[in-house]
Image: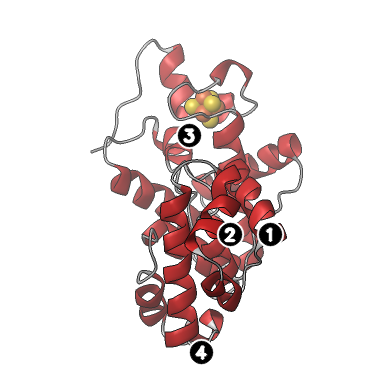
Amino acid sequence: MTRSAIQLSRLLDELESLYGPPHPSWPTDPYLFLVWWHCGYPASDIACAKGWASLTKSVGTTPEKLLATSPEKLAAALKPGGMVPELRAQRLKEIAMRVKDHLDGDLRSALTGPLDKARKELKKFPNIGDPGVDRILLFAHIAPIAAVPSNSPHVLVRILLGRERENYGVNYREAQTAIESQTPAAFDARTRAYLLLKQHAQQTCKRTNPRCDCCPISTSCAFFSGKLRGRPAPASN
Ligand code: SF4
């Protein structure tokens, strides 16, 4: 095991000691995840959970139920999840229609087989880019992809390299490469890394104002070392 591999493994152990064993707070079935993802806007675990609770109570989540419900009623059910409920209602109908009419009501089965085909299929759904595809395939136990939380690729880049890049795509790839090379290609290991990094970003290593002074892994963090020296650590590209 390389020095950096030991470092990431130890960092994840320290984060788990702080936050406890992680569990996903969203449905892991691919179709239900797509529904949940559109239950809140701006999408966050809290907003989506509120919209999801309201939708499951007043409408349901099957394609048939979503398609049989009027746009107005669907939008009212999604309102607790935040902004643009009318647009999210329309998106849910598109998702339901695609799954029912094109995939015989079974998205999961459509994702089996070559990974490229599964990625292409998922990207046909609204608001699903590469990070969303990675997350769905990992948590549905379809492929143990080194998924990175879409709102926090900066965490690992800060810790390992010192400073996040300007470009979101470069940050994502840097973080993904680190997870890929330093965790076993197994569902448990990669879902654990995803969830712990996500939680660390939400609670401590915030995007615009990281709470380095109370961070339990600051002594292992290149970004923090740079701050102590009075200058940001250099980005490598
Ligand atoms: S020390 Fe600061 S930058 Fe480093 S992981 Fe902790 S919060 Fe993030």
Residue 81 lies left or right of residue 99; in this view the side is right
Q: What's the amino acid at mark 3?
A: Ile
Tell me the CA gap for discs 2 and 4: 30 Å
Q: Earlier in the sequence, mark 4 or mark 1?
A: 1
Q: Residue at x 55, y 20 (%)?
A: 211
Tell me the CA gap for discs 3 and 2: 18 Å
Q: What's the amino acid at mark 1?
A: Ser
Tell me the CA gap for discs 4 and 1: 25 Å
Q: Residues within 10 Å of mark 1 (few under 14, many from 20)?
A: some
Q: What's the amino acid at mark 2?
A: Arg
Q: Secondary structure at mark 3?
A: helix
- Foreground mark, 3 or 2, reads 2
Give the labeled residue for mark 4. Answer: 104
Q: Residue at x 75, y 48 (%)?
A: 21
Give the labeled residue for mark 3. Answer: 159
Q: Secondary structure at mark 2?
A: helix
Q: What's the amino acid at mark 4?
A: Asp
Say which quarter of the image contains residue 24: bottom right
Give the labeled residue for mark 1. Answer: 58
Whether disc 3's CB lies below 8 Å from ligand 1 is answered: yes
Residue 198 lies left or right of residue 103; in this view the side is right
Q: Give the colouring mode of the picture.
A: secondary structure
Badges 1 and 2: C-beta atoms under 8 Å apart?
no
Q: Earlier in the sequence, mark 4 or mark 3?
A: 4
Give whichever of 235, 139 is nearer the camera: 139
Asked if residue 144 can be seen in this view, the reply is: no
- Foreground mark, 4 or 1, reads 1
Q: Earlier in the sequence, mark 1 or mark 2?
A: 1
Tell me the CA gap for discs 1 and 3: 44 Å
Q: Which mark is residue 190?
A: 2
Q: Residues within 10 Å of mark 3 (few under 14, many from 20)?
A: many
Q: Earlier in the sequence, mark 2 or mark 4?
A: 4
